[in-house]
């Protein structure tokens, strides 16, 4: 049985639990219950949801615009605005409104109270037709129910926790995803791959690289726990041994100032590998340093939540050698209009290549614009149906089609390794064979 494959790629408030589908899953995914793409629930929620303006349609985004995320999210806002602001939809002109869902109180990370306020702001604007966001899956858990009740379609460039759209045994929580859709119909979609796919592919990659025993950590948030559980589950399924608590992902204290005791615990476990499911702002710099100080030879794997320069700026040389993934296509592998866009972006930004999520922010905006043009009206129900029914829309990341859950069909997982400096080397596409 083939356990791993890598190629150089030529294709491209209901629940308040505390980034990035398609492809195979390490556990059986399903739609998770009765929520459907339309029906009586949508008809009731979407009744009388026509905009009040005779000239404007509003498109909102809600992303964290402070802290370690800003190189990604700032580029996303720029690309969303360039794609949709001022565009015409019949007699209407699109007005783009960017909202920040981070706060100083959360050290620049996403803030649940702020995200809920943003969702309510958009829901209460009769001319709002699309909500692009969020960046963090935990934030999406809070806003999806608000927008579902208001018949306002939500389109994410970055959320990758599978439980937002489907149930995956051993990874998602009981009641997901239906608990996020109080009106009983689907109103959320995304252009990025889900973490059951990313975690599974990364786990097989580790096994192929010689890992036999792994300690799996997460930052206790929705994204980190989801991808940590997915990685641990699949690593065990393909023949590896998980030595962290309960044979699964173990949450670390993101507020701790020292992880030396945890690092010694990992070393004593005999693990030859650590997987860390986290976002950069959740103590990762110190965590990497302490783990490497205790055991310099241990292999460390991280997901797209830390695959950014601000993470490496924090870890310094402790990040060297780290294996990283991204739940989508690498910028260097874009083709057609995507390749042209990347070249133009690089030229316009003095030789700086677009960050990963700039392409996915652009793609989300392209899907939103295509849906608005298809609906050709300022009626939320019509716009929602058009976007949820997205099929073969040309975007910078390739043709985009949503399945019945709102997940993008197709897509890839990209792999990287840090050398002795940023950026990491692109290693190709990794796949999950089981």
Image (cartoon, rainbow, N blue to C red):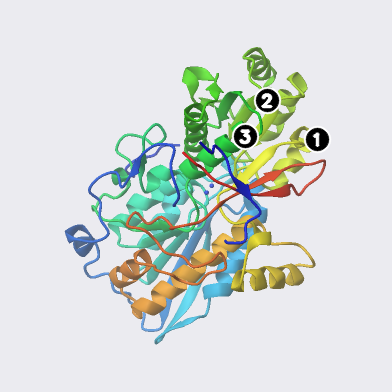
Q: Nearer the viewer, mark 3 or mark 1?
A: 3
Mark sitting earlier along the chain (3/2): 3
- Residue 325 in view here: yes
Q: Nearer the viewer, mark 2 or mark 1?
A: 1
- Mark 2 crowdedness (10 Å alpha carbons): few <14, some 14-19, many ≥20: few
Q: Which residue is label 1 attached to?
A: 317
Q: Which residue sits furthest bottom?
A: 91
Q: CA distance from mark 3 to mark 2?
A: 34 Å
Quarter of the image for residue 351 reads bottom right
Mark sitting earlier along the chain (3/1): 3
Quarter of the image for residue 390 reads bottom left
| Residue 318 in picture, x, y percent from top left | 77, 32
In this rendering, is residue 25 above or below 210? Answer: below
In this rendering, is residue 152 above or below 235? Answer: below
Say which of 101 and 192 sits in front.
192
Residue 309 disc label: none
| Residue 228 in picture, x, y percent from top left | 52, 33
Say which of 431 and 219 sits in front.
431
In this rendering, is residue 268 above or below 289? Answer: above
Seen at 74% across and 38% down, the residue is 314
Side (left or right) of 276 relative to 394: right
Q: CA distance from mark 3 to mark 1?
A: 25 Å
Mark sitting earlier along the chain (2/1): 2
Q: Which residue is label 2 attached to?
A: 257
Q: Which SS class for mark 2?
A: loop
Q: Which residue sits furthest front?
A: 1
Q: Which residue is label 3 attached to?
A: 208
Side (left or right) of 195 relative to 79: left
């Amino acid at each position: 049985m083939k356990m791993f494959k890598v190629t150089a790629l030529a294709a491209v408030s209901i629940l308040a639990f505390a980034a990035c589908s398609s492809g195979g899953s390490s556990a059986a995914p399903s739609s998770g219950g009765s929520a459907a793409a339309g029906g009586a629930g949508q008809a009731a929620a979407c009744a009388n949801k026509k905009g009040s303006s005779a000239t404007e349609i509003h498109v909102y985004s809600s992303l964290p615009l402070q802290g370690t995320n800003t190189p990604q999210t700032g580029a996303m806002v720029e690309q969303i605005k360039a794609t949709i602001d001022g565009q015409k939809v019949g007699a209407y002109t699109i007005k783009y409104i960017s909202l920040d869902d981070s706060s100083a109180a959360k050290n620049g990370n996403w803030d649940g109270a702020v995200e809920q306020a943003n969702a309510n702001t958009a829901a209460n604007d009769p001319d709002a037709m699309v909500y692009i966001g969020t960046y963090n899956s935990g934030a999406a858990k809070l806003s999806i129910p608000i927008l579902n009740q208001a018949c306002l379609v939500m389109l994410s460039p970055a959320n990758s926790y599978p439980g937002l759209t489907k149930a995956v045994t051993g990874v998602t929580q009981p009641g997901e995803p239906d608990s996020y859709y109080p009106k009983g119909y689907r109103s959320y979609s995304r252009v990025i791959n889900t973490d059951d796919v990313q975690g599974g592919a990364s786990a097989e990659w580790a096994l192929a690289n010689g890992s036999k025993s792994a300690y799996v950590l997460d930052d206790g948030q929705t994204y980190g726990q989801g991808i940590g559980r997915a990685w641990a589950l699949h690593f065990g399924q393909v023949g590896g041994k998980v030595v962290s608590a309960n044979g699964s992902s173990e949450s670390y204290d993101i507020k701790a100032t020292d992880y030396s005791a945890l690092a010694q615990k990992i070393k004593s476990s005999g693990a030859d590998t650590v997987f860390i499911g986290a976002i950069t702002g959740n103590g990762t710099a110190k965590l990497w340093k302490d783990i490497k100080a205790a055991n310099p030879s241990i292999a460390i794997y991280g997901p797209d939540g830390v695959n950014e320069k601000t993470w490496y700026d924090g870890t310094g040389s402790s990040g060297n050698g780290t294996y990283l993934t991204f739940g989508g296509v690498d910028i260097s592998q874009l083709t057609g209009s995507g390749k042209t866009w990347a070249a133009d972006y690089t030229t316009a930004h003095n030789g700086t290549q677009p960050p990963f999520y700039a392409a996915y922010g652009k793609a989300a905006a392209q899907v939103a614009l295509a849906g608005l043009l298809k609906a050709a009206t300022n009626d939320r129900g019509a716009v929602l149906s058009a976007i949820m029914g997205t099929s073969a829309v040309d975007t910078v990341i390739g043709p985009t089609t949503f399945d019945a859950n709102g997940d993008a069909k197709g897509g890839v997982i990209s792999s990287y390794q840090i050398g002795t400096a940023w950026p990491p080397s692109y290693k190709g596409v990794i796949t999950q064979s089981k």
